[in-house]
Image (tube, coloured by chain):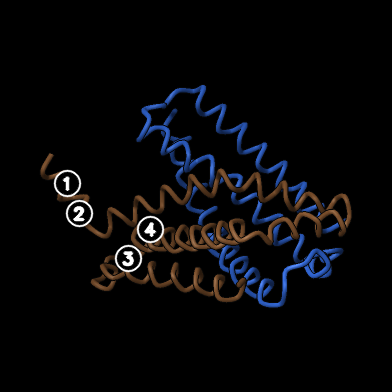
C-alpha cells in the first residue's frame, strides 16, 4: 500500500491520470460538438443562433476547459508515443514538463484570444 | 479476444493516435485563429463550405477519433472496471460507429450546407 502511494506521488503517474481522465471527458464532449456543428444543416442563421448561445460566460469557461483538456490529451499522447517508439534517452524524463508546457500554451492561447 | 485481434487493436490505437496528433494540432491552431478573428457561423462556413481540403481533413479526423476513442475506453473498462466481456466490445464498437455517423454528419453540415 505504501509502495502504491509512492508510485502515485510522481509526475508520470499524474500525467497518466490526466491522459485517461481527459480522454474520457473528451469522448463525452465529442457527440455534443458534432451535434452543435450539425446545426449548419439548417443554414448559417441556425448555426449563428447556437453560437450566440455559447457567448455566455459559463459556456466560454467550459470551452477553455475543453480546449485545455484537448491540448493535455494531445501532449500526453505524444509523450506516450515517444516513450513507446523512441529509444530511451535521458531527456525523456523531462517529457512530462514539456507536455505541461504544451497544455498550458494552447490553453492560454485560446483563453487570451477568446475573451 | 485472440492475440492477433489484440495486436490489431494495439496497432489501430497507435496509428489513430499518430493521425490525431497531427489533426488535433491543426484543430487547436485553427480554433485559436478563429476565435481571435471573431467566431461566427459565416466565418466558419466561409472556410469550410465547398472546401474539399477541409472536408478531407475533418473526414480523416472523425474516422481517426472514432477508432481511437472506443479502443481507449475498452482499456479503461478493463483496467478500472474489470469489464472485459465480448458484450463490452460490441457496445464500444457500436459507440465508435455512432460517433463516426454523427461526426460525418457534422462534416457534411459544414461542407455542404
Give the blue chain's letter: B
Q: Chain of mark 1?
A: A
Query: Which type of secondary structure does the marked residue at label 1 adopt?
Result: helix
Taking the image as shown, residue A23 lies to the left or right of residue B60, namely left
Location of mark 1 (residue): A5
Q: Residue at x 87, y 58 (%)?
A: A45
Chain identity for the colour brown used in the image: A
Closer to viewer: mark 3 or mark 1: 1
**Picture quadrant of residue B51:** bottom right
Nearer to us of marks 4 and 3 is 3
Q: Identify the disc placed on residue A59.
A: none
Of tags 2 and 4, the one toward the viewer is 2
In contact (CB < 8 Å): disc 1 and disc 2: yes
In the rendered image, residue A13, in percent from the top left (x then y), is placed at 27, 53
Q: Earlier in the sequence, mark 2 or mark 4?
A: 2
Q: Residue at x 65, y 41 (%)?
A: B99
Q: Is residue B33 above or below residue B113?
A: below
Amino acid at each position: 500500500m505504501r509502495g502504491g502511494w509512492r508510485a502515485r506521488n510522481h509526475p508520470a503517474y499524474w500525467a497518466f491520470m490526466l491522459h485517461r481522465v481527459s480522454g474520457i471527458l473528451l469522448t463525452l464532449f465529442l457527440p455534443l460538438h458534432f451535434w452543435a456543428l450539425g446545426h449548419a444543416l439548417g443554414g448559417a442563421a441556425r448555426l449563428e443562433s447556437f453560437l450566440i448561445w455559447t457567448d455566455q460566460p459559463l459556456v466560454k469557461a467550459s470551452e477553455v476547459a475543453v480546449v485545455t483538456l484537448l491540448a493535455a490529451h494531445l501532449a500526453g499522447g505524444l509523450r506516450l508515443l515517444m516513450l513507446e517508439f523512441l529509444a530511451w534517452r535521458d531527456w525523456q524524463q523531462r517529457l512530462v514538463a514539456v507536455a505541461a508546457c504544451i497544455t498550458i500554451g494552447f490553453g492560454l492561447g485560446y483563453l487570451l484570444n477568446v475573451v | 479476444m485472440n492475440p492477433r485481434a489484440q495486436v490489431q487493436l494495439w496497432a489501430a490505437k497507435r496509428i489513430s493516435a499518430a493521425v490525431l496528433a497531427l489533426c488535433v494540432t491543426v484543430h487547436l491552431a485553427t480554433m485559436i485563429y478563429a476565435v481571435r478573428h471573431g467566431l461566427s457561423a459565416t466565418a466558419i462556413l466561409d472556410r469550410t463550405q465547398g472546401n474539399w481540403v477541409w472536408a478531407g481533413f475533418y473526414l480523416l479526423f472523425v474516422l481517426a477519433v472514432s477508432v481511437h476513442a472506443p479502443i481507449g475506453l475498452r482499456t479503461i473498462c478493463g483496467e478500472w472496471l474489470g469489464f472485459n466481456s465480448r458484450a463490452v466490445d460490441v457496445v464500444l464498437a457500436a459507440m465508435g460507429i455512432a460517433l463516426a455517423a454523427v461526426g460525418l454528419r457534422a462534416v457534411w453540415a459544414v461542407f455542404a450546407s
